[in-house]
Image: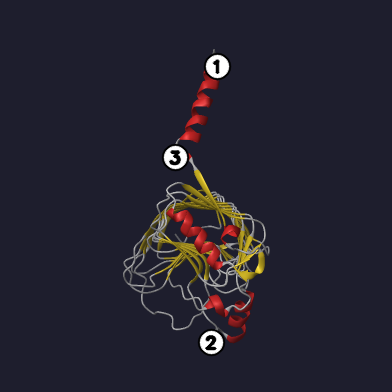
């Protein structure tokens, strides 16, 4: 009787899946729209037409990108307002940028999604071929070079899922979320040279309910950067290096800024990075704030600056503001963090004299110096406490 009930139950859902329109999925193959998988013919129109068809569908839709290399020779913007609330890019190939970096370099984005809902990107690779632009910037100090394009951006979008994507050699930032909510990112692999300028791995700003998990980021700037207006961000099991670490900020770029709150970074691993876990703000007035941040279970492997709060941020020491940071930093917990620092100062909390950091707590932190010197801490205008074993000594709190 139990087996019969189970069979009838399964049969019911099979019939519903077959007969109910809401369960049907339309598949759109980009090759059917004229895309060429040879890496030489511009497939931009084919991708846009495939999107238009999927967007107009009232059913769930999959845009299939078969194996091969697809040249996307110009900026590609996928606009929202779709009838379908469930569109998946199933990518088995590689999307490649033009060899001439100037084609994309003067724009803001290479592939962008604007005002979309329910979009997923599964698999595949994006190769932005940013090496030539990096060389231009490094050789000419950027004087005659375009700024460069972000590889993949989402703005004012919700219910976004990215799984198993590779982003290679971005001209500027690899992946950006601005004004988004309900985002899940998992098993990303982001690769750029350690000296590639401004190639942040993932940037989140003005967004809420974002999850980034089980990913590996190798880049020339912040592995993950967290901008103003970010709320409810969960980062777990991310490996970073090379790169500048995971950073909240830089903040206080503008006098009127939203705050950053409810950020958790759990079980991150930093390998040979410039920084580990960092909060940074310019020394100028701001309405911004940072509160309820949890840094949990991180491992540092030969990291130059493992734990940093820097409220006098000025990366190139040129035209630095001489004011006091207005950003208020409070309720920040560092728990279960261990590993090695490449410099003697393993912990540096340089907070604002006008708005000292408050509610700083370190629990079971064990950082040693990799060159056999004694690890040290430095803090100014920082108020907090330690629990359990904390090394180096934090008597400056």
Earlier in the chain: of badge 1 and badge 3, it is 1
Quarter of the picture holding the C terminus: bottom left
Q: Residue at x 58, y 81 (%)?
A: 137
Horizontal and vertical percent position of residue 288: 34, 65
Question: Is residue 303 at least partly visible in the picture?
Answer: no
Q: Position of residue 338 (x, y in %)?
A: 59, 53
Badge 3 density bin: few <14, some 14–19, many ≥20, Cα 10 Å: few
Task: Examine the image and state in which quarter residue 375 appears.
Answer: bottom right
In the displayed structure, 379 sits above or below 59; it is below
As drawn, the label of residue 21 is 3
Q: From the image, which quarter does the N terminus lie in?
A: top right
The alpha-carbon separation of the residues under discs 3 and 2 comes to 56 Å
Q: Nearer the viewer, residue 391 or 343?
A: 343
Label 3 element class:
helix
Packing grade of label 2 (10 A; few <14, some 14-19, many >=20) is few
By what rule are the colours in the image chosen? Answer: secondary structure
How many C-alpha atoms fall within 10 Å of the one at disc 1: few (<14), some, or many (≥20)? Answer: few
Helix, strand or loop for disc 2:
loop
Residue assigned mark 2: 143
User: Mark 1 — residue?
Assistant: 4
């Amino acid at each position: 009787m139990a087996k019969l009930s189970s069979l009838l139950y399964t049969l019911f859902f099979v019939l519903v899946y077959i007969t109910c329109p809401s369960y049907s999925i339309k598949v759109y193959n980009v090759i059917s729209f004229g895309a060429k998988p040879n890496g030489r013919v511009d497939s931009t129109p084919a991708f846009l037409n495939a999107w238009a068809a999927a967007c107009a569908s009232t059913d769930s839709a999959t845009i299939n990108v078969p194996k091969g290399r697809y040249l996307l020779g110009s900026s590609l913007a996928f606009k929202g307002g779709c009838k379908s609330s469930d569109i998946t890019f199933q990518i088995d190939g590689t999307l490649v940028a033009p060899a001439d970096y100037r084609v994309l370099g003067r724009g803001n984005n290479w592939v962008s999604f604007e005002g979309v809902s329910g979009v997923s990107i599964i698999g595949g690779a994006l190769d932005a071929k940013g090496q030539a632009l990096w060389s231009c910037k490094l050789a000419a100090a950027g004087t005659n070079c375009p700024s460069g394009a972000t590889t993949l951006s989402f703005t004012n979008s919700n219910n976004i899922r990215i799984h198993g994507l590779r982003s290679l050699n971005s001209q500027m930032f690899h992946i950006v979320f601005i004004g988004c909510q309900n985002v899940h990112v998992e098993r990303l692999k982001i690769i750029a040279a350690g000296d590639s300028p401004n190639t942040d791995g993932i940037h989140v700003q003005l967004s809420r309910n974002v999850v980034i998990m089980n990913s590996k980021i190798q880049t020339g700037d912040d592995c993950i950067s967290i901008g103003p207006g970010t709320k409810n961000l969960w980062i777990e099991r991310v490996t970073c290096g090379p790169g500048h670490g995971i950073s909240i900020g830089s903040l206080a770029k503008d006098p009127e800024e939203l705050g950053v709150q409810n950020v958790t970074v759990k079980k991150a691993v930093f390998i040979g990075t410039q920084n580990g876990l960092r909060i940074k703000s310019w020394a100028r007035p701001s309405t911004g704030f940072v509160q309820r941040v949890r840094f949990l279970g991180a491992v540092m492997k030969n990291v130059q600056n493992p734990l940093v709060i820097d409220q006098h941020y000025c990366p190139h020491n040129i035209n630095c503001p001489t004011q006091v940071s207005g950003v208020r930093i409070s309720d920040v917990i560092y728990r279960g963090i261990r590993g090695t620092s490449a410099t003697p100062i393993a912990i540096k909390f340089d907070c604002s004299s006008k708005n000292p950091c408050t509610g700083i707590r370190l629990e079971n932190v064990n950082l040693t110096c990799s060159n056999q010197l004694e690890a040290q801490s430095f803090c100014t205008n920082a108020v907090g406490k330690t629990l359990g074993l904390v090394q180096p000594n934090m008597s400056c709190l």
